[in-house]
Image (cartoon, rainbow, N blue to C red):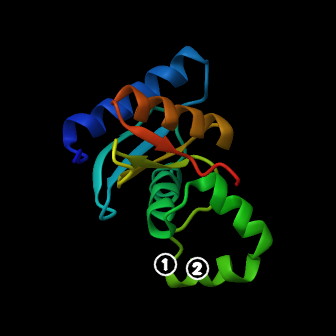
Amino acid sequence: MTSLNLEKASRIVDAALEHAASQGMKPLTVAVLDAGGHLVAFKRQDRTGILRPAIAQGKAWGALGMGLGGRALAQRAEMAPAFFTALASASDGRVIPVPGGVLIKNAEGDVVGAVGISGDLPDNDEACAVYGIEQAGLIADPGQPH
């Protein structure tokens, strides 16, 4: 069983930032959490806003907490806004249900963590997270609609 260690988490962060640079994206903040929701690796590029760390971690934390990538969470939030208002309260505002929160799975399909990225458009944040996860040899689950 593959677990999420510091080496893999660091590779995810660095690859995500490399991808962002190659695409000319805005400065990003990248957070990688383990399956228990604990921060393993984190980088905040120069000139990012002061809320970006909380947003990046909230995207990852929400994906872990609900077992769905941010894209699926965003879709569900549109369909059930009252539930997501309650979820925000229950999580002390930690759940950010938008693309850019991506589950990390191992080859067996087990969730081993999540990545949250904030700084550019949500679709771009998500693309960087997926790229980073794949470069670390793991499987990205952004929560594509079913």
- In screen coordinates, is 131 left or right of 108? right
On residue 99, the disc is none
Q: Which residue is drawn at 39% across and 26% down?
A: 135
The spot of residue 35 in percent (x, y) is 32, 59
Q: Distance between the residues labelled 1 and 2?
A: 6 Å
Classify residue 51 as left or right of residue 84: left
| Residue that mark 1 sits on | 91
Identify the residue at horizontal 60%, vertical 18% (top origin).
23
- Label 1 neighbourhood size at 10 Å, few (<14), some (14-19), many (20+)? few
Q: How many marks?
A: 2
Quadrant of the rendered structure where residue 34 is?
Answer: bottom left
In depth, the one of 52 and 82 nearer the eye is 82
Q: Mark 2 points at which residue?
A: 87
Camera sees residue 98: no
Image location of residue 132, percent across then percent down: 43, 31
Secondary element type, mark 2: helix
- Dot 1 falls on a residue whose secondary structure is loop
Name, please, the residue furthest toward the right: 79
